[in-house]
């Protein structure tokens, strides 16, 4: 049985609170927080406002997370050992994030975590792309740094404790729910 994913859109997802925990990318995709199961940047190439969501998963050694401010590394150029071996290009998700900077449209941020050996993703609210910079990464090739800043509003503040989704969506692969 196939389950269609909700459409991509900017802003908070109705019914999803900042601090809510998803037990994997499939749960986040089904709810519509971050639809991509593989990519860290969720975007539609035709959306002139930019990306709708990003995952901060710790796969890039040049990332920096200060809570309300995140130095997010763009996509591309890594090998299977997570070393940056090629320059990143301003296309795909990187171009989408640059469009966010230009349009002012916020992105949803999911923080990846490995609690109890299980991947969890915590919805951390809306962030604006404040700046974009192309810099030499620690491994040598050029990368894109996107400075993300938490949107300041009462509904966008992290809670004092995390909220775990009560539903278990099971295994989600290739557009099918099993």
Image: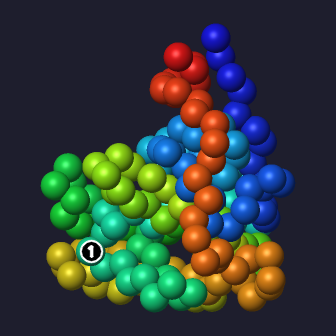
Towards the viewer: 128 or 3? 3
Camera-nearest residue between 124 and 21: 21
Residue 12 in view in this figure: yes
Q: Residue at x 70, y 46 (%)?
A: 32
Judging depth in this view, the residue of 55 and 81 nearest the camera is 55
Q: Residue at x 69, y 80 (%)?
A: 157
Front residue of 168 and 123? 168
What coloring was used for the rendering?
Answer: rainbow
Residue under circle 1?
61
Q: Residue at x 78, y 42 (%)?
A: 7
**Residue at the spot 21% in from the left edge and 54% down from the top edge:** 79
Q: Position of residue 147 (x, y in %)?
A: 53, 85
Q: Does 163 appear above or below 137? A: above
- Secondary structure at numbered mark 1: loop
Image check: 36 left or right of 11?
Answer: left
Q: Quadrant of residue 58?
A: bottom left
Q: Position of residue 91 (x, y in %)?
A: 52, 61
- In the image, taking residue 34 as reference, residue 116 lies left or right, namely left
Q: Is residue 147 visible?
A: no
Residue ranking furthest to the right: 14
Picture quadrant where residue 31 is located: top right
Percent position (x, y) of residue 50? 69, 65
Is 126 displayed left or right of 93 in the figure? right
- Residue 163: image location, x then y, percent: 62, 59
Q: Quadrant of the N terminus?
A: top right
């Amino acid at each position: 049985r196939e389950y269609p994913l909700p459409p991509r859109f900017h802003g908070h997802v109705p019914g999803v609170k900042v601090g809510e925990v998803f037990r994997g990318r499939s749960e986040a995709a089904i709810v519509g927080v971050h639809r991509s199961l593989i990519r860290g940047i969720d975007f539609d190439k035709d959306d002139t406002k930019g990306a709708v969501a990003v995952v901060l998963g710790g796969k890039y050694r040049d990332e920096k997370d200060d809570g309300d401010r995140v130095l997010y590394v763009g996509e591309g150029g890594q090998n299977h050992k997570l070393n940056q071996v090629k320059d990143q290009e301003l296309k795909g998700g990187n171009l989408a994030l640059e469009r966010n900077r230009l349009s002012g449209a916020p992105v949803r941020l999911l923080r990846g975590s490995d609690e109890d050996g299980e991947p969890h993703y915590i919805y951390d609210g809306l962030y604006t792309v404040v700046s974009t910079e192309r810099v030499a990464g620690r491994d040598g090739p050029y990368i894109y740094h996107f400075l993300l800043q938490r949107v300041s509003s009462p509904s966008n503040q992290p809670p004092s404790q995390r909220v775990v989704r009560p539903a278990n969506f099971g295994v989600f692969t290739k557009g099918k729910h099993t």
